[in-house]
Image (cartoon, grey):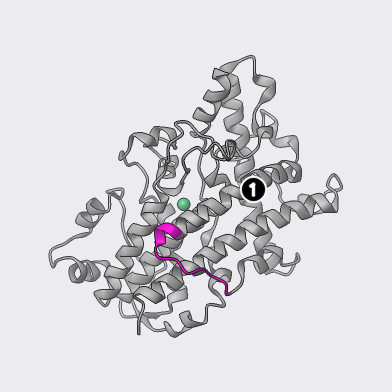
Amino acid sequence: MKPILSIFFLCILETVSGAWGRHDLLTPFAIEDVAWLNSWNTIEVTSFQHFLSKAFAKDYKENNFLRQYQLNPTTKVIFKHHEQEGQKMTASWILIHYVDEPDWGMDQNLDISADQKFMGGTKGPTSQAFRHLYWKKWNLKAPWRTFHIPPREMGEALKRAQIFYDLAQTAFEAKEPYWAFRFLAWTLHYIQDLGQPFHSCQLLTPKFIAWNSLLSFETLIKRTTQIISNYHFIYEDYVVFRIEEEVQNKFKKYFISALKGTTFMNSSSAYLIARHSADDSNHLSYAIGEASYTFFGDQFLNPSIDVPNSPKGKFPLSPYEQSLRLSEKEKTIFLQNTAKSLEKTAFYTRSLLELAKEEFLKK
Ligand SMILES: [Zn+2]
């Protein structure tokens, strides 16, 4: 039994990518029909220092901020998209252009919790995993999809969502709406990360275990880790690919129509919304794992295939749509399950914005 348990333990070290690949691709559809957001259409850009001085203290600097919020000390909070101070932006523009910001390094190379050794370590790109994942405590009622070792609640994504939501409120109350929406974008990032089933469950299906390596423990761990990474990365790449194709009208708008909508839930905190997002995607994890295995085929079990460390484009994504290997039903199951995850991700995105509107975004 020991090797099998240990497999779960070590698989956590798999490379963690950007959850949905590109949050900036999903967010526009998720918020497009949120009509009230359009009234926030002339938000003045102010410098980060300007915000810090107003919201904290005159001599409060970026390094104080990075320390207080426990962020990578080399982080630079900059205008990545060349907006200028004094320029007027829309709320949607800020949300879309900065929803990926927590993936730009702020949560990397930190040594903040003993649990990090189970969730991507403390160095390099994988070290942000601890902040971008959440695994609920192991539960006897759902022994498979909640399985991880140690079995306690792990990962900080829920807390980070709440921390930046609170900071958005602070910014808004300091009359710094540009920064309020920028921190709401950060909050949305964590909520959206949790909506990706490869991020809310460790081992989605037993099919990802390298069963033929059972005799060599070391190989078993290495191979299973690689298999999960392969499916994880090909899955995310495929979702981005498919949405881009849908944008160009090359495919039926399966994912785009799942993202669009006006539905949301009333909740009392960003923390709870993030938790709902994680719970829903965890519920879908087995179905997504199984459907991914069928859709992408068993080629990713092959030891010579290493998707995360291969050059972009090495595994063309278009053939899956036309594949004769797959029945229409198999393709539909994959697309439907993924669409469900995207629909939930968009739903919780809108729910967070509604909460902010209710609590502090007042004209
Ligand atoms: Zn992330």
x and y, in percent, of residue 149 in the image: 47, 31
Q: Which residues are magenta?
A: 262-272
Main SS of residues in magenta: loop
Compared with 157, 243 (above or below) is: below
Under mark 1, the amino acid is Tyr
Q: Which residue is mark 1?
A: 235
Whether residue 277 is visible, yes or no, is yes
| Badge 1: residue crowd in 10 Å (few <14, some 14–19, many ≥20) | many
| Some atom of ligand 1 lies within 8 Å of the CB belonging to the residue at label 1 | no
The image quarter containing residue 252 is bottom right
* Residue at 60% over, 22% down: 220
* Lateral position of residue 345 relative to residue 85, left or right: right
Q: Is residue 263 magenta?
A: yes
Compared with 216, 65 (above or below) is: below
x and y, in percent, of residue 268 in the image: 40, 65
Q: Quadrant of the N terminus?
A: top right
Q: Looking at the image, which residue sits at the far front?
A: 141
x and y, in percent, of residue 347 in the image: 55, 66
Q: Looking at the image, which residue sits at the far top?
A: 215
Whether residue 100 is visible, yes or no, is no
Compared with 327, 52 (above or below) is: below
